[in-house]
Amino acid sequence: MSAESNLIPLLNTAEEDVNRQMQICNACRYCEGFCAVFPAMTQRLEFNKADIHYLANLCHNCGACLHACQYAAPHEFDVNIPRAMAKVRLQTYIDFAWPKKLGALYQRNGVTLALSSGLALCLFLILTLLIQGNLFTKIEGGNFYHIFSHNTLVALFGSVFVFSFLALLVGVVHFWRKVTPKEEKRQQEPLPAMLQAGKAALTLKYLDGGHGQGCNNEDDAYTLSRRRFHHLTFYGFMLCFAATSVATLYHYIGWEAPYPVFSLPVMLGIIGGLGLLVGPAGLLYLNYKRHPDHGDQAQRPMDRAFIVLLFMISLTGLLLLCVRETTLMPLMLALHLGFVMAFFLTMPYSKFAHGFYRSAALFKSYLERFKEKKSQ
Amino acid sequence: MIDVLVIGGGNAALCAALMAREAGASVLLLEASPREWRGGNSQHTRNLRCMHDAPQDVLVDAYPEEEFWQDLLKVTDGKTNEELARLVIRESSTCRDWMRQHGVHFQPPLSGALHVARTNAFFMGGGKALVNAYYRSAERLGVQIRYETPVEDLEIKDGRFVAALIPERQVNGVHLAAERIEAKSCVLAAGGFESNRDWLREAWGQNERGEYPSDNFLIRGTRFNTGTLLKRMLSLGADRIGDPTQAHMVAIDARAPLYDGGICTRIDCVSLGVVVNKEGERFYDEGEDFWPKRYAIWGRLVAQQPEQIGFSIIDSKAVGHFMPPVFPGSKADSLEQLADQLELPRETFLRTLQRYNKACRSGSFDHTKLDDCATEGITPAKTHWARPIDTPPFYGYALRPGVTFTYLGLKTDATAAVHFANQPSKNLFVAGEMMAGNVLGKGYTAGVGMSIGTAFGRIAGHNAALSCLDRQPV
């Protein structure tokens, strides 16, 4: 079961460390019940570059295997799977980023980058408004299309979003091809595996610890808080996205903004926005409380940047709703659009990518499982 | 004064502490190791051998008391105590709900361990996850826990525990003064003496070749089981049980670390090939029985060989049919090269392999049952899974005896009381490796160490609590 069997690429330090640790884990296997990584590991005797990137993205960084590990430091084997996997994951994001040169952004990704890009965009928008002379103008009914026309926004955000989404997709498809051997691609009905992978991703199955009590955060005790805050974040985000989509649809069928509070787009936005406020706040708190040995410390700025950006999008969005009939509306609109634009721009080069690569890895793991069942 | 003092920090000690606390006693637990090494050998365990009369969550079919007892009788060659053994067996059928209450999770058998799906319940995440769960539960219930607090001596008066003595010591660069800790009762659960190199040397002595065999032993578990307290108890006149050379001993990878190599250092391909000693000769039937039933005798077998080393030899036919070893084996395209790599005498090695290959009677190979592939006309025979070693590449793994835990301990009874001149102490109890020799005179069967530790830990803790309340032990 090796992808790229005709050519064996050399492993870098991070990959070699996963290889080393997987040899230890494969001879131990105590953690098999925690997540999908270890069952996938047991189907291999050797770990090539493709396997290592696949397993790294399958790892949810839940921490369970680290606290249960008889070979964790101070043991001389120094096994720390969550950390080793996290380091390779960053490598995956960099290697498969498209266009390739922009992958380097991952190395400089941090709170600073996200906030400064966000603020720069805000400033840009504020300047535009100043030129137009209506930064502190009260707009009757709170219609922000009086400030930026619907078409301007669609053109600006639509094009950036489409580019970013495609760039991300190119990366994930490239990753998928790399980790899936040719012979595996044809012979299998993908739907059952896809459904299972979708379910695992949408329920965050692998943050439940295998026993339903959750993953680890600050110590060896299990907690469901990360799973719950992540759900709030993800589903909050999706509701906000749905709100924007519904509003766009309304616009094209002739019902133009602003919409009343009890309309579908605004309600979706409020509920989603609250989720996207509480979720990231909780995740950020957990991130600061996180056991120092979990994952790669060097990536925490990237994680936090992403979380903070999501929080700011939601905060400015909800504030915009509150002040939409006051003179503060144009300013708040500029801030909100600035953060959204920063998010769209950095989508393929930020933590946002983790959901896509992980879903692909989950899909592969279920394909393997179904294949194994069939062959038994 | 504290009610119950528990000395030790592994499974048996934690079971005792939890039970004593649940019975209403105030409990102090002293662990010799730092927090990160806590749990003794329990951190390396993975399952509990359990009696059950019908399928039970992760356990399939049934494993009745009588069958468990017969298994124990067989592996110990009768060197066991039926009353205590049956007590352990029965306790193993009822203790798991209690374990769950304290946060232990069970899972179906791990891949590569399906043969024990019927007899053994696996801890999710292994023994360290279990130990973590017990410590969390103990802290929650108000058990006081102190790490880096090794007990050096006990004060015993007329067969009663009075106090434990802790020497002065350095902890993280801080000098701590000697301490004397009194308690109304005490549970000893501080492990065997496997990590005491001097004691091992004394026990195993010198062999006919002039070697000290134990110098080549590796210890699979904790470096903190130095047997200090066990030795002290024996010299204080506690009744003893067991032979100091008897232990749970398996053949492990010779490159394993000196301590804490745990499960991953085992070599699981013995029954798929042959094993030769330093002189290139075979010395035991590699296919006598299923590997899980035989792995526990190979440590001793290797210990009896010159320089206490053996070499498991397989060919490419075996690859993928056993648990992957943690370190890569020596790999060669010919047996000559393999002999050179392993520094074995070429001629003898080749002659041994040729003889073996010729002696392999053709049969239908099936590693999942006792198949009909056996040798004919060689000694020792290989009675199952004998296939010629003829398909390169060839692989070799050097083996050393790996001690899991020693069986010399304190004699006890069904109340877990320590005995002095055949009289049970009223307030001093023992559990875990310090008394496992009562049930295991020799040999081993997977998961039974945890069954003994859990059963006697619970009994000892409960009775220690009762003795503080001046009630009779049960």
Image: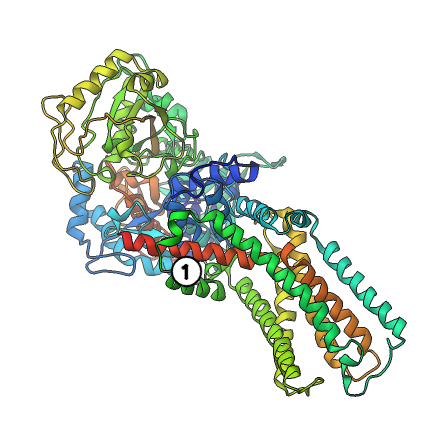
x, y (%) of residue A175?
52, 50
User: Is residue B200 in view?
Assistant: yes
**Residue A76 position (above or below residue A131):** above
What secondary structure is found at the residue carrying circle 1? loop
Disc 1 crowd, CA 10 A, few/some/many (<14, 14-19, 20+):
some
Q: Nearer the viewer, residue A6 or B244?
A: A6
x, y (%) of residue A29?
38, 45
Residue shown at 32% from the left, 39% from the top: B323
Q: Left or right of B215: which side holds A235?
A: right
Q: Left or right of A32: which side holds A221?
A: right
x, y (%) of residue B150?
49, 38
Residue shown at 26% from the left, 33% from the top: B317
x, y (%) of residue A123?
83, 65
Q: Nearer the viewer, residue A14 or B72?
A: A14
**Residue B231 position (above or below residue B14):** above
- Locate residue A91: give its quadrant: top right
Q: Chain of mark 1?
A: A
User: On the image, numbered disc 1 is attached to which residue?
Assistant: A211
Considering every residue shown, the one lying at the far left of the view is: B377
User: Is residue B1 in view?
Assistant: no
Residue kind at label 1, given as amino acid type: His
**Residue B81 position (above or below residue A34):** above
Name the quarter where the N terminus of chain A is drawn: top left
Disc tally is 1
